[in-house]
Image: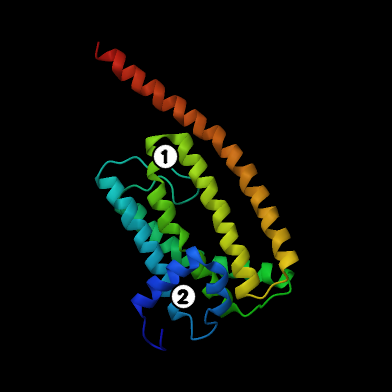
Amino acid sequence: MNSGTFDFNLFLKESKETLVNPKSYFSSMKGSGGFTEPLIKGLIYGITTGIIYLIFYFLKIQTLGLGYMGNAVGFGEFFRIVISSVIGLFIGAVILLIISSICKGNTDFELNTRVSASLMVVMPIYALLSIFMGIYIYLGFVISLILFIYMLWLLYNGLCEGLKCKKESARIVCYVLIALVVIFSLLELRNIAKIDRFNRDTKRFFRESKK
């Protein structure tokens, strides 16, 4: 991407590299050039995520997920996701900067913002996979948990290769985050079980009322 321009083909290539070869991508990613590129990148991921949920909404496909990207409904939620993607980009950069500082890595805010933008590649993937929550709620839960853990793997590569953090420290941080994700996911599973029982009871009620 040249200064003042945005190369969409390069964006697609970088997105693919982030997902399939994060170590190589983060080790060679550009660390300067302004905040326009990561901002546009984050916006594209946010808009794509919102569009996916809108399509599910208009097709009346149930999507129920973990975190703020779940339960997307209508245009209001679409704009909320887009706005949240911009805010989340910079909040993520601040969090990365703090982690990088703890792990003796690069504390340049622009570089941290670029890593944050790259990690947002999981947003549209999460939106696509959220359809499994509508098919079978527990399957969707497992897929969501796996995706969160994979996102932490991307984070680990972003810390070590992009921000040049000490690998031992970055590994400890990621282990702690994995533990937190598992704990909160188990708590969320209890809520999911309640929702599943409610859905089954509702379907049973309508079946019996038709007899």
Q: Amino acid at mark 1?
A: Met
Label 1 neighbour load within 10 Å: few <14, some 14-19, many 20+: many
Q: Nearer the viewer, residue 148 or 17?
A: 17
Please tell me whether mark 1 or mark 2 is closer to you in this view.
Answer: 1
Please name the residue that numbered disc 1 is placed on. 133
Q: Is residue 53 above or below residue 10?
A: above
Q: How is the image coloured?
A: rainbow
Q: Secondary structure at mark 2?
A: helix
- The answer to whether residue 158 is left or right of residue 38 is right
Vertical arrangement, residue 77 with respect to residue 137, above or below: below
* Rendered residue at 41%/63% (across/down): 83
Q: Which percent across, then down, holds residue 4?
A: 38, 88
Front-most of residues 140 and 102: 140
Q: Amino acid at mark 2?
A: Pro
Rounded to the nearest angstrom, the CA distance separating label 1 from label 2 is: 30 Å
The N terminus appears in which quarter of the rendering?
A: bottom left
The answer to whether residue 172 is left or right of residue 40 is: right
Residue 38's disc number: 2
Residue 149 appearing in the image: yes
Q: Give the residue at x 43% y 78%.
A: 37
Q: Which comes before the other along the chain, label 1 or label 2?
A: 2
**Foreground of the two, 16 or 184:** 16
Is residue 89 visible from the viewing direction of this image? no
Label 2 Cα neighbours within 10 Å, binned few <14 / some 14-19 / many ≥20:
many
